[in-house]
Amino acid sequence: MAIKLHPSIDKGTKAGNKKFKGGTLTCLCATDPVTVSIKGNVAHNHACGCSKCWKPAGALFSVVAVVPKDKVTVTANEQKLGVVDGSATIQRHACSGCGVHMYGRIENTGHAFYGLDFVHVELSKDKGWNKPEFGAFVSSLIENGAARPKDMKKIRDRLKQLRLPPYDALSPALMDALATHAAKQKGTLKA
């Protein structure tokens, strides 16, 4: 039996629709749910093993992607949203009713990912979102108590089986973007 990582990827992933125009995310509350509209598709969708991202019950990973923050609008019950950890780099806005993270925003204008919001498209019934591309912060599963060290090879093998290359940070392209931003700020790399 295959290791269960997350309900939206355990049976494989499907390619997104290049013409997809966006959709609505809905929290898990049975009444008065929070809804968030996203215009356009997401980028850098991935399985994340960090200890901060919201994960559905029983999942080892979250599945999270980014979208420009000007494409994200809370459309219902915004009063139910609150920031989970005000000291975190990503300000995760969670529903006070069900605990689901509806979006995460980086408020630090000096951060390489400023202007991007982190969203969980599994909260949408709309079809066409870009599929997950990689696994991030895989070794964090040990740190946050979700997995034992002896299970990590099986978890990485399962990610590879699902065509989600596992990384212990972000994907190389995103790590390069962070390093490039830092080098430009330090003056060690000229634009």
Image (cartoon, helix red, strand yellow):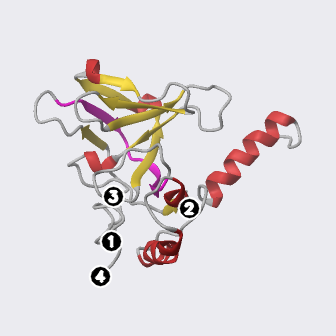
Query: Which amino acid does the dot numbered 3 rest on?
Result: Ala
Point 33% across, 69% down: residue: 4
State the residue position of label 4.
1
Residue under pointer 2: 139
The residue carrying mark 3 is 59
**Which mark sits nearer the N-terminus, 4 or 3?**
4
The residue lying toward the viewer, choosing from 44 and 147, is: 147
Q: Main secondary structure of the magenta part?
A: strand
Q: Earlier in the sequence, mark 1 or mark 2?
A: 1
Determine which quarter of the picture holds residue 163.
bottom left
Going 59% across and 38% down the picture, which residue do you hit? 113
- The amino acid sitting under disc 2 is Ser
Stretch of the chain drawn in magenta: 33-49
Q: Look at the image and say whether residue 105 sits in the magenta stretch.
A: no
Question: Where the N terminus falls, by quadrant?
Answer: bottom left
- The image shows residue 75 at horizontal and vertical percentages of 25, 25
> What amino acid is found at the position of numbered circle 4 in the picture?
Met
Apparent side of residue 109 relative to residue 141 in the rendered image (left or right): right
Is residue 44 magenta-colored?
yes
Q: Earlier in the sequence, mark 3 or mark 1?
A: 1
Disc 1 marks which amino acid?
A: Gly
Of residues 54 and 125, the one nearer the viewer is 54
Q: Is residue 16 above or below residue 71?
A: below
CA separation in Å, label 4 and label 3: 16 Å
Residue 165, horizontal then vertical, whole percent: 53, 69
Looking at the image, residue 69 sits to the left or right of residue 87; the answer is: left
**Residues at marks 1 and 4, CA–CA distance in whole angstroms:** 14 Å
Circle 3/circle 1 CB separation < 8 Å: no
